[in-house]
Amino acid sequence: MAALKKYIIAGLLVWLPFAATVVIVKLLIDLLDKTILLLPPEWHPVALLGFSIPGFGIILALSILLLTGMLAANLFGRRFVEIWERILNKIPLVRSIYSSIKQISNTIFDPSGKSFRKVVMLQYPRKGLWSIGFLTNDNVGDEMSAVDDQLVAVFIPTTPNPTSGFIIMTRSDEITELGMSVEEGFKFIISMGVIIPDGPAHAELERNKVAQSLADS
């Protein structure tokens, strides 16, 4: 019975990640493929060619992103975007939502920015307990100078859902920068600490696994 359970678990470990990957990729492809709905019905491949083209919506979505980026990068495009943003900023509810999302997007995707570029560790929620977070602002002293002029902002995500979490403002000497990438940090959080990035801790874990396998054999 124990051997049967072992084989079933081994099978799950093979198929579960593969099945989850297929489902997620399919959801993304289906979502991007719906971009074809932006075209008039008479322009759809079914109407023009008599049959559908799998992935045509994805090609259309990538083309729209590429053309939009090329347009926004030149002088005329920037002028058009400025006019468009001025229009949006005159709409009360839309103004607050658009400006907030735009500011967050610019901060995260700016290649020269420092937000979400470092994985750090700090003692939270109390001394002796350590949490992993992402440095989002390495200097909030101007805004919080009445409290401390050496404060940094750290986002501490929840597990296993990293889209929610807490913003902690602490002194820069209270955090420890970790030698892992942001991707590795997210893997560690989403896996609830199971996936340990390469490093001393990961090497020690691998040695323990090998030793346990030899002992079992």
Image (spheres, rainbow, N blue to C red):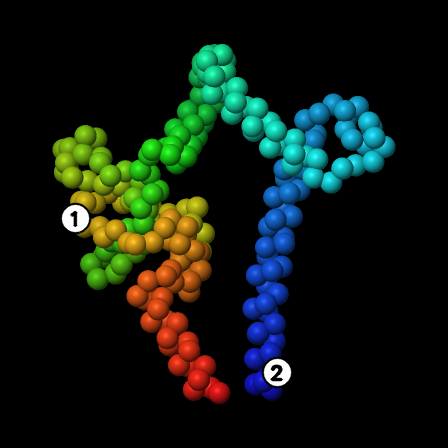
What residue is drawn where x is 57% and y is 74%? 9
Residue to which mark 2 is pinned: 4
Task: Identify residue type, mark 1.
Answer: Asp
Q: Is residue 53 left or right of residue 205?
A: right
Q: Residues within 10 Å of mark 2 (few under 14, many from 20)?
A: few
Q: Position of residue 138 (x, y in %)?
A: 24, 39
Image quarter where the N terminus lies is bottom right
Q: Position of residue 170 (x, y in %)?
A: 21, 45
Q: Residues within 10 Å of mark 1 (few under 14, many from 20)?
A: few
Q: Nearer the viewer, residue 62 or 6?
A: 62
Q: Is residue 29 left or right of residue 90?
A: right
Q: Dots 1 and 2: beta carbons under 8 Å?
A: no
Q: Position of residue 121 (x, y in %)?
A: 27, 54
Q: Is residue 14 visible?
A: yes
What residue is drawn where x is 49% and y is 12%? 76
Mark 1 lies on a secondary structure that is helix
Kindly indicate the quadrant of the structure image that contains residue 11.
bottom right
Q: Which mark is residue 173?
A: 1
Residue lying farthest right?
50
